Image: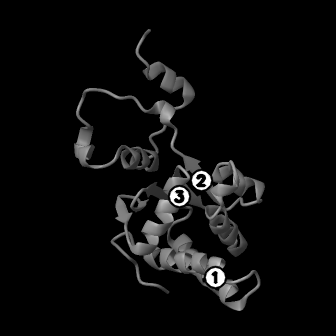
Amino acid sequence: MAQPDDASGIPLGGFLRDLAIAWKSLLAYPAGHPVRRESFERAHGRLDEVLAISAPLVLGVSRDGLIHGQTKVDSGSAQRIAQALHRERVALVIIDVDVRSAELELFLRSLTADRQQGEVEPLWDRLLQAGVRGIVLEPVDYHSVVMTDDDAPGGHASKSIWETITRELLAGRRLSPFEREQQLPPP
């Protein structure tokens, strides 16, 4: 079993490293190639180790890393994955314990969609259309963002608004459409 990366006891770094290696093999080898298949099996095995400790796995996405709980993982592998997800406007990645290796491959293949070929559907829609059920992506809902003159509570001023929103989503702070409407000032 892999060693934990931080005080949480979760070997997240090993999974993210192996996922990045699988992503590279996806681009370098044709479908069915043994190296490609083995890299996805290894990444899936690492994911199983993570999910045995913390299921489902919920990761926040920032421009320069992935957030798990209060810990930001900013290794090279985490940064590459986070940058691709950030470009797709993904705020949260939720990976279920029943995720299959083939779903990891579909997920990474969807991250490499060629935008030069015209308009591409949002990543979360592409995954659903491909039949991926073990990985759920949530975009940032900017409708609930309100600008004020007040300073950010808790000293979040040094973080990007994206990271602040992502941390709020990770903490379970979501506003329903009705609550959002109630938060708006009267006309």
Q: Residue 187, position in %: x, y?
A: 44, 9
Q: Is residue 10 visible?
A: no
* Residue drawn at the location 48% of the way across and 38% of the way down: 174
Who comes first in sequence, dot 3 or dot 2? 3
Q: Where is residue 110 in the image (x, y as percent from the top left)?
A: 66, 62
Between discs 2 and 1, the one toward the N terminus: 1
- For the residues marked 3 and 2, what is the alpha-carbon distance in whole angstroms? 9 Å
> Badge 2 local density, few (<14 within 10 Å), some, or many (20+)?
many
Residue at image position (72%, 61%) is: 132
* Comes first in the chain, label 3 or label 1: 1
Label 2 to label 1: alpha-carbon separation: 26 Å
Is 40 situated left or right of 83 in this image? Answer: right
Residue 102 position within the rendered picture, expressed as x and y whole percent measured from the top left: 72, 72
C-beta proximity under 8 Å, tags 3 and 1: no
Residue that lies at the very extreme toward the bottom in this rendered image: 34
The residues bearing labels 3 and 1 have C-alpha atoms spaced at a distance of 20 Å
Q: Which amino acid does label 3 sit on?
A: Leu
Q: Which of 157 and 80 is in front in this view?
A: 80
* Vertical side of 142 occupied by 6: above or below: below
Q: Which residue occupies 71% across, 54% down?
A: 126
User: Mark 3, mark 1: which one is toward the viewer?
Assistant: 1
Q: Mark 3 points at which residue?
A: 85
Q: Quadrant of the rendered structure where residue 108 is?
A: bottom right
Q: Which amino acid does label 1 sit on?
A: Ala
Disc 2 secondary structure class:
strand
Q: How many labels does the image show?
A: 3
Q: Which residue position is annotated with label 1?
A: 28
Q: In this view, does 151 lie above or below 110?
A: above
Q: Name the residue under label 2.
A: 137
Q: Is residue 54 visible?
A: yes
